[in-house]
Image (tube, rainbow, N blue to C red):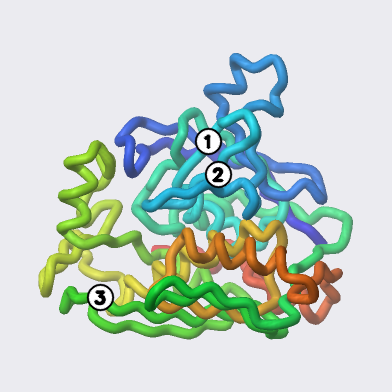
Amino acid sequence: MQKTVAKTITFDGVGLHSGAPVHMTIEPARANSGISFVRSDIAADCNDFREASISARWDSVVPSKLCTLIRNDDGVEISTIEHIMAALAGCGVINAVVHVNGPEVPIEDGSSAPFVTAILSAGLSRQEGPTRALKILKTVEVVQGDAIARLEAAETLEIDFHIDFEDAAIGIQSKNLVMANGAFIRELSNCRTFCRKAEVDWMQSNGLALGGIPGENAVVFDGSEVESGAEGLRHVDEPVRHKMLDALGDLALAGAPILGRYVGVRSGHAMTNALLRKVFATPGAWAFVTVDEATALTLPGAGVTALDLAYCA
């Protein structure tokens, strides 16, 4: 069965790059409608509500170096959607409408945990109709320099990620995780976005990352130094875990849960989107399948309840 949120959920925060206040709601949606975003500030002035709506799909993504950004045919945009998309996918939400009163989703604490907490606290509503999944049938790969993004055939979603940074406090990190039965919530959801100090300086000098507060909604690395707030790192390998969180959010733009193994080596948002585009352009590489009862139990949001909130603390 499909799921949507049981009731409207509200967030008030700031945009990571704009620093501007943002009001966002997640609202229930009908079965088979998928995830969509609506610019509520623009919808108020539109004759046609659809002008302000953007489907959360791989083919709505436009190039952006710093985040995942989607745009509709009328030029309406919403950016930094990866953390909320990961939360929805990780909680098993198939259908929802996300209203945002500006061009950017609120950053919250830089992870998906606040979104997961709110979604599970509000509860999920089961909907009639089968769930379909995107089954990977053969390997598809994108390579850019020393970076790789690959999808391979597998019976459920698995993410395998490797990063390698010059900063001693990050260094080389690898992690593999089968995303079944709430693994996202337990292992990845509270891992925060991170960057290097030089990147922060460059972004802020160019009018970006104006809402970023090191240690509060981002972890900043500078060689062997770490600025992560009073609590310190939430995991010793928080950076690679956050990369996996981002990957889940970007893979959710396939429009359905994925049955396949994602391998990321130094990859990011743009490469994951390029990979999805290549998958859908490759005959015989994929198929949409109806999820049977046994497979449904292996999906990322299967069986999660409010009791899982302890892992988001």
Local SS, label 3:
loop
Q: Amino acid at mark 3?
A: Phe
CB within 8 Å, label 2 to label 3: no
Q: Amino acid at mark 1?
A: Glu
- Give me the C-alpha separation between circle 1 and circle 2: 6 Å
Q: Quadrant of the N terminus?
A: bottom right
Q: Amino acid at mark 2?
A: Ile
10 Å neighbourhood of mark 3: few (<14), some, or many (≥20)?
A: few
Tell me the tag on residue 77.
Answer: 1
Seen from the viewer's position, the closer of residues 272 and 250 is 272
- Give me the C-alpha separation between circle 2 and circle 3: 28 Å
Please state the horizontal and vertical placement of residue 21, each as a whole percent of the image: 36, 31
Seen from the viewer's position, the closer of residues 173 and 127 is 173
Rendered view: 2 above or below 308: above
Local SS, label 2:
strand
Report whether residue 178 is seen: yes
Seen from the viewer's position, the closer of residues 192 and 136 is 136
Side of 243 relative to 292 (left or right): left
Side of 25 relative to 242 (left or right): right
N-terminal-most mark, 1 or 2: 2
N-terminal-most mark, 2 or 3: 2
Q: Residue at x 86, y 69 (%)?
A: 290
- Reading the image, the residue beneath label 3 is 165
N-terminal-most mark, 1 or 3: 1
Please state the horizontal and vertical placement of residue 243, each as a whole percent of the image: 41, 69
CB within 8 Å, label 1 to label 2: yes
- Reading the image, the residue beneath label 2 is 70
Can you tell which quarter of the image residue 305 is in? bottom right
Local SS, label 1:
strand
